[in-house]
């Protein structure tokens, strides 16, 4: 099979699985996932595998899109009006943990901030 054919088949399968997942999530109140799966001829393990694969595909699709920039409210006590860097003054936000401090400005790229925060999260 060519890579294009494989990709089309994978996308078709993921769409079918997404439909099944939606149906399962709309199952009657009180019906367990295992019971729904038994009624539809799939194992509970297959259902959760399919759920994971559909979620992964959705996340991969979102990675290519630029996230909408959101304004996050920050308490005034957390803002420092200016931060000295050599001869210049940079307004921004300081994020401090026990061992690290990060100064964020309006010009800080969001992907960089996300990567730094992930590292800080793992380091703590």
Image (spheres, rainbow, N blue to C red):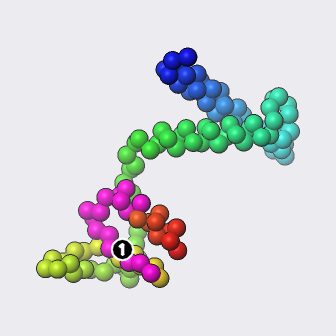
In the rendered view, would you say 29 is above or below 11?
below
In the rendered view, would you say 106 is above or below 58?
below
Image coordinates for residue 17, horizontal then vertical, percent? 66, 31
Magenta stretch in the rendered image = 99-115
Lateral position of residue 30 relative to residue 20, left or right: right
In the rendered view, would you say 44 is above or below 103?
above
Q: In which quarter of the image is the N terminus?
A: top right
Lateral position of residue 3 relative to residue 29, left or right: left
Q: What is the count of numbered marks?
A: 1
| Residue pictured at 15% horizontal, 77% vertical | 88
| Residue pictured at 61% horizontal, 38% vertical | 54
Q: Is residue 25 visible?
A: no
Closer to the camera in the image, 107 or 116: 116
Q: Can residue 47 be seen in this view?
A: yes
Quarter location, residue 108: bottom left
Disc 1: which residue: 102
> Callout 1: helix, strand or loop?
strand
| Residue pictured at 13% horizontal, 79% vertical | 87
Magenta stretch containing residue 114, yes or no?
yes
Quarter location, residue 51: top right
Magenta stretch containing residue 97, yes or no?
no
Extreme residue in the left direction? 87
Q: Tell me if mark 1 has few (under 14), some (14-19) or many (20+) residues whose alpha carbon lies within 10 angstroms of its own.
A: some
Image coordinates for residue 56, horizontal then vertical, percent? 57, 42
Lateral position of residue 92 relative to residue 65, left or right: left
């Amino acid at each position: 099979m060519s890579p294009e054919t494989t990709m089309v088949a994978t996308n078709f399968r993921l769409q079918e699985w997404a439909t099944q997942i939606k149906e399962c999530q709309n199952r009657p109140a009180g019906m367990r996932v295992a019971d729904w799966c038994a009624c539809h001829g799939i194992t509970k393990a297959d259902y959760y595998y399919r759920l994971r694969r559909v979620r992964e595909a959705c996340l991969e699709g979102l990675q290519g899109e630029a996230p909408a920039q959101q304004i996050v409210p920050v308490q005034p006590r957390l803002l420092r009006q200016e931060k000295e860097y050599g001869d210049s003054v940079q307004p921004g936000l300081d994020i401090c943990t026990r061992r690290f401090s990060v100064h964020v400005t309006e010009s800080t790229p969001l992907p960089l901030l996300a990567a730094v925060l992930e590292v800080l999260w793992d380091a703590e």
